[in-house]
Image (cartoon, rainbow, N blue to C red):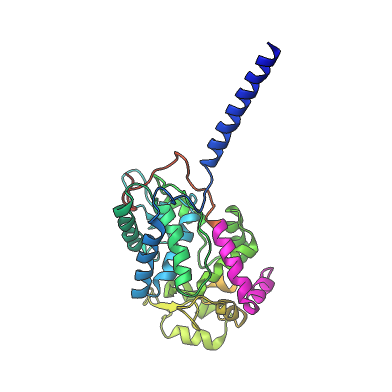
C-alpha cells in the first residue's frame, strides 16, 4: 500500500509539473512561433515592408516609430493600430500621435498578404515587431531576432497614450521616468532615441527650440528657421532629425547632439551636462556598440506586456477588433 501510494503521489506531482510547464510556455514569446503554423509568415511580411521602403525611404523610420508607440501603451499588442469605436477612443489622435504616426497602411498590406497564405494565424502586434526589424535592416541598421507569439488587444486608450508616450518637449528626468515605467533604463532610453538617426519632425515640435533655446548651434538654428516660421504658419513643415544622413541608420545622431544640433528638445537634453552625456559620447565614437545595444533594447522593448496564450485575439483586420 505504501508503495502504491508513493507512486500515486509521484504521478500526481508529474501531472502538475507538466501542466505548469505547459501553462508557463503559453506565455513565452519565441522566434520559432510560426515555424509550423505559418512558415511563410516572416518572408511574406518582409517582402511587403521592403517594397514599401523602396518606394519611400522615410517609411523605415515611420515603422520603427510605430512599433515603439505601440509597445509604450498597454504593451506590444497592436493597440496603436485600432481606430476609434463607440466603446473607446483609440491612440491615433493622442498628442504624440496625432497627424504624426505613419505606416498603418503598410501594416495593413502586410496583414492582407499574410492572411492570404495563413488566415487567422499571425497577429498585427507581431507584424509591427517584424516590420521594425526589417525596416532597420533595410536602411543599413542593426538586425535582431524577433520573438513572436503576441496576440492583439481588443481595446486602446488615448488617455494612456498621452500619459505614457514621450513627447518632444520633455526634460531628461521625465524621459528617464517614462522609460523606467516600461522597464527600460537610462542607457536603453538613449540608445532607443538613436532611432532618430532616421525620419523627420514637424515644425510645431521644434519651433520653440530653434527660436528660444540657447543650447543650440546658431547656424543650425538659423538654417531650420527658414522652413519653420516663428508664428503658427508651417506647423506641418518637415525637417530631418539627422541632417547629415537622414535616410541611413548610423550613429551621426549622437555626433549631432554633441555639436548642439539636436532638432528636438527631447533629443538635445540627452547631451546637455546631465547624466546621459557619457552614453551619448560613447555611441558617437563607437557605432558597433550602438548597433549591438540598439538591437538588444529593441528585443527588450518587444517584451513589454505582450498578450499571449488565450488573451486578446488575432485580428482579421489590424484597424478593428473582430
User: Residue 61 at x, y = what percent?
Assistant: 44, 70
Q: Main secondary structure of the magenta part?
A: helix
Write down the region rendered in magenta. Answer: 273-300
The residue lying furthest to the top in this view is 1
44 is within the stretch colored magenta: no
In this orientation, which residue lies closer to the viewer: 194 or 294? 294
Residue drawn at the location 60% of the way across and 68% of the way down: 292
Question: Looking at the image, can residue 283 be seen?
Answer: yes
Residue drawn at the location 64% of the way across and 65% of the way down: 187
Quarter of the image containing the C terminus? Answer: top left
User: Residue 233 at x, y = what percent?
Assistant: 36, 77
In this orientation, which residue lies closer to the viewer: 37 or 198? 37
Residue drawn at the location 44% of the way across and 68% of the way down: 135
Quarter of the image containing the N terminus? Answer: top right
Residue 145 relative to residue 270: left or right: left
User: Residue 296 at x, y = what percent?
Assistant: 59, 62
Amino acid at each position: 500500500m505504501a508503495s502504491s501510494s508513493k507512486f500515486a503521489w509521484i504521478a500526481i506531482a508529474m501531472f502538475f509539473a507538466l501542466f505548469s510547464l505547459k501553462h508557463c510556455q503559453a506565455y513565452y514569446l519565441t522566434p520559432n512561433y510560426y515555424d509550423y503554423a505559418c512558415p511563410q509568415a516572416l518572408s511574406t511580411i518582409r517582402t511587403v515592408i521592403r517594397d514599401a521602403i523602396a518606394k519611400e525611404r522615410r517609411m523605415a523610420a515611420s515603422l520603427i516609430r510605430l512599433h515603439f508607440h505601440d509597445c509604450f501603451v498597454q504593451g506590444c499588442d497592436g493597440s496603436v493600430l485600432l481606430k476609434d469605436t463607440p466603446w473607446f477612443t483609440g491612440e491615433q489622435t493622442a498628442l504624440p500621435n496625432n497627424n504624426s504616426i505613419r505606416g498603418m497602411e503598410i501594416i495593413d498590406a502586410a496583414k492582407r498578404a499574410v492572411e492570404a497564405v495563413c488566415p487567422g494565424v499571425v497577429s498585427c502586434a507581431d507584424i509591427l515587431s517584424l516590420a521594425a526589424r526589417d525596416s532597420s535592416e533595410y536602411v543599413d541598421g542593426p538586425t535582431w531576432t524577433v520573438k513572436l507569439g503576441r496576440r492583439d488587444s481588443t481595446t486602446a486608450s488615448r488617455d494612456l497614450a498621452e500619459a505614457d508616450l514621450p513627447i518632444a518637449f520633455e526634460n531628461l528626468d521625465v524621459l528617464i521616468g517614462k522609460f523606467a515605467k516600461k522597464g527600460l533604463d537610462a542607457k536603453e532610453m538613449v540608445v532607443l532615441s538613436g532611432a532618430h538617426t532616421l525620419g523627420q519632425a514637424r515644425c510645431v515640435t521644434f519651433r520653440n527650440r530653434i527660436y528660444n533655446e540657447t543650447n543650440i548651434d546658431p547656424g543650425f538654428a538659423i538654417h531650420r528657421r527658414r522652413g519653420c516660421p516663428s508664428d503658427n504658419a508651417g506647423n506641418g513643415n518637415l525637417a530631418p532629425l539627422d541632417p547629415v544622413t537622414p535616410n541611413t541608420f548610423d550613429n551621426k545622431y549622437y555626433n549631432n547632439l554633441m555639436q548642439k544640433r539636436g532638432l528636438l528638445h527631447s533629443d538635445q537634453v540627452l547631451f546637455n551636462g546631465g547624466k546621459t552625456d557619457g552614453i551619448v559620447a560613447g555611441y558617437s565614437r563607437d557605432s558597433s556598440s550602438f548597433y549591438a545595444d540598439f538591437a538588444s533594447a529593441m528585443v527588450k522593448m518587444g517584451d513589454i506586456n505582450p498578450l499571449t496564450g488565450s488573451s486578446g485575439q488575432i485580428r482579421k483586420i489590424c484597424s478593428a477588433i473582430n
